[in-house]
Image: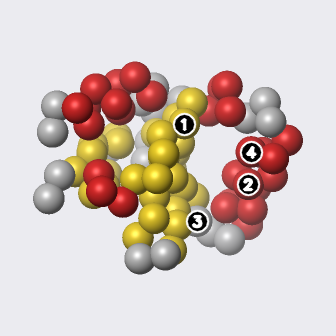
Amino acid sequence: MKYLHLGLDTSIEIKNIVGIFDLDTTTISKHTREFLSLCEKENRVVNVSYELPKSYILYDFDGEYSLYLSPLNTATLLRRMENQ
């Protein structure tokens, strides 16, 4: 299995990643903000750092999705995935 390290002590399995998104550019959309708010209300948000998040990762594990907030930017996360 291949894992992606998101920050602190958190790694997730790459095959279950739905998408990696930049927090600044995607939250311009009203629909994205509503989706993020819904995830928070449903306790599906996992913050993996004490720093300000730069990206979020949508993760699907057996039909149950989670949203991971990471202090790493999308380019760093994608580079880490490619190096696996």
Is the C-beta separation of discs 4 and 1 under 8 Å? no
Q: Amino acid at mark 1?
A: Phe
**Left or right placement of residue 34 versus residue 8 in this view:** right
**Left or right placement of residue 75 versus residue 82 in this view:** right
Density class for disc 1 (Cα within 10 Å; few <14, some 14-19, many ≥20) is: some
Task: Name the residue at 85% across, 41% down.
Answer: 30
Give the alpha-carbon distance from disc 4 to disc 2, as whole Å. 5 Å
Is the C-beta separation of discs 4 and 2 under 8 Å? yes
Task: Name the residue at 34% across, 31% down.
Answer: 78
x%, y% of residue 44?
58, 65
Q: Amino acid at mark 2?
A: Phe
Q: Earlier in the sequence, mark 1 or mark 3?
A: 1
Secondary structure of the residue carrying tag 3 is: loop
Secondary structure of the residue carrying tag 2 is: helix
Q: Amino acid at mark 3?
A: Arg
Tag 2 residue: 35
Task: Identify the disc placed on residue 21.
Answer: 1
Tag 4 residue: 32
Density class for disc 2 (Cα within 10 Å; few <14, some 14-19, many ≥20) is: few
x%, y% of residue 51?
50, 33
Give the alpha-carbon distance from disc 1 to disc 3, as whole Å. 16 Å
Density class for disc 3 (Cα within 10 Å; few <14, some 14-19, many ≥20) is: some
The quarter of the picture where the N terminus appears is bottom left
